[in-house]
Image (cartoon, rainbow, N blue to C red):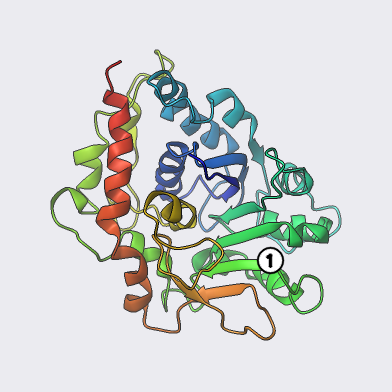
């Protein structure tokens, strides 16, 4: 792909299995999404698990896909090296609270773009904002070098202090921070991200309870015997909605994929239609780069994603079929 993005994910993998679902999905697009970190962070009901991140990187077996003429995907060894442990408990940032994860966010943000193109580092927040806030506390200069797409809602409920630290910092520390907050409180009032799995075309294989059986089960490998099962046969279902393909965090990277794969949207303008949702600036004079869910009903906000359901799931279906490629 001619267009690639620098991406770092902060995930509360270790709670609802939907983070595993999103991780597997993302790993099959690392030809476009060039990963510079996976941070194991806290989240509602989660036990942070960097070991779990590494396990699912291995279960996805990207090297098998690379051997099937998809060599532009990142290799397993490189991906494993990017997994870092963040905070185990949500808390407001402060002195002495740095983690391996927060330090890695600073290091990768301040590093030169590997392509020397001056690209920003996209921070995708799938759990509580604990480690991201700590990184901003430790090195405020990163604010001008990142683009933050944060799945808020219950993640903010779990660590309101860290989210508010970042938001309040726009008043004096980082007024130009570029930030999409998907799911502003109160929880469930808009929650654009839920459009990934709620609404849209739910017929047949596109149904949130059927897609796994139709397109994932039986797929993948056992990583040359490292595991006793194929990835697709142990791919987990979400806790809520029970037994579903939820992927509540996937809109964060669909936002980047949409302009490349569907020529829909522009990463510089969250106000345009996009697989990852459509957003607006609630306070453009104060915070020119801060975007939230549309000022609309939850159904209308979620429709900005679920209207594209067949498109984004259909594209992933085509990549899942790579496991069946004959060379």
Q: Is residue 122 left or right of residue 240?
A: right
Vertical position of residue 37 compared to residue 181: above or below:
above
Vertical position of residue 269 compared to residue 264: above or below:
below
Vertical position of residue 316 compared to residue 246: above or below:
above
Residue at (77% x, 46% y) in the render: 103
Residue at (20% x, 54% y) in the render: 207
The image shows residue 232 at horizontal and vertical percentages of 31, 32
The image shows residue 78 at horizontal and vertical percentages of 61, 27
Q: Is residue 71 left or right of residue 288?
A: left
Residue at (27% x, 32% y) in the render: 321
**Identity of the residue furthest to the left in this view:** 204
The image shows residue 169 at horizontal and vertical percentages of 76, 73
Query: In which image quadrant can residue 165 be found?
Result: bottom right
Q: Is residue 6 left or right of residue 269?
A: right
Counting the numbered discs, the total is 1
Instruction: Looking at the picture, tell me which residue is in the foreground, 197 or 5.
Output: 5
Q: Which residue is mark 1?
A: 162
Instruction: Looking at the picture, tell me which residue is in the foreground, 123 or 53.
Output: 123
Quadrant (top left/top right/bottom left/bottom right) for the C terminus: top left
The image shows residue 121 at horizontal and vertical percentages of 66, 51
Q: Secondary structure at mark 1?
A: helix
**Residue 233 visible to an observer of this rendering:** no
């Amino acid at each position: 792909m001619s267009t690639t993005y620098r991406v770092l994910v902060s995930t509360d993998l270790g709670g609802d299995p939907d983070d595993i679902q999103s991780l597997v999905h993302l790993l099959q697009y690392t030809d476009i999404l060039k990963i510079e970190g996976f941070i194991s962070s806290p989240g509602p009901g989660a036990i942070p698990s960097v070991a779990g991140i590494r396990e699912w990187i291995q279960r996805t077996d990207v090297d098998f896909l690379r051997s099937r003429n998809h060599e532009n995907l990142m290799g397993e060894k490189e991906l494993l090296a990017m997994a870092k442990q963040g905070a185990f408990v949500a808390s407001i940032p402060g002195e002495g609270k740095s983690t391996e994860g927060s330090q890695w966010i600073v290091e990768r943000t301040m590093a030169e773009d590997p392509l020397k193109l001056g690209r920003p580092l996209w921070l995708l927040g799938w759990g509580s904002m604990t480690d991201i806030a700590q990184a901003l506390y430790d090195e405020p200069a990163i604010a001008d070098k990142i683009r933050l797409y944060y799945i808020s809602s219950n993640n903010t409920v779990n660590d309101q202090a860290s989210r508010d630290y970042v938001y309040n910092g726009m008043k004096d520390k980082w007024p130009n921070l570029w930030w999409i907050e998907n799911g502003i409180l109160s929880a469930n009032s808009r929650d654009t991200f839920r459009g990934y799995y709620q609404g849209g075309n739910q017929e047949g294989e596109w149904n949130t309870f059927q897609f796994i059986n139709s397109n994932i089960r039986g797929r993948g490998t056992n990583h040359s015997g490292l595991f006793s099962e194929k990835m697709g046969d142990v791919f987990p279902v979400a806790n809520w909605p029970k037994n579903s393909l939820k992927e509540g965090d996937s809109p964060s990277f669909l936002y980047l994929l949409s302009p490349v794969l569907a020529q829909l949207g522009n990463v510089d303008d969250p106000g345009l239609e996009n697989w990852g949702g459509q957003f607006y600036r609630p306070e453009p004079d104060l915070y020119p780069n801060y975007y939230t869910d549309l000022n609309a009903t939850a159904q209308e906000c979620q429709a900005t994603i679920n209207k594209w359901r067949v498109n984004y799931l259909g594209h992933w279906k085509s990549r899942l079929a790579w496991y069946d490629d004959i060379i």
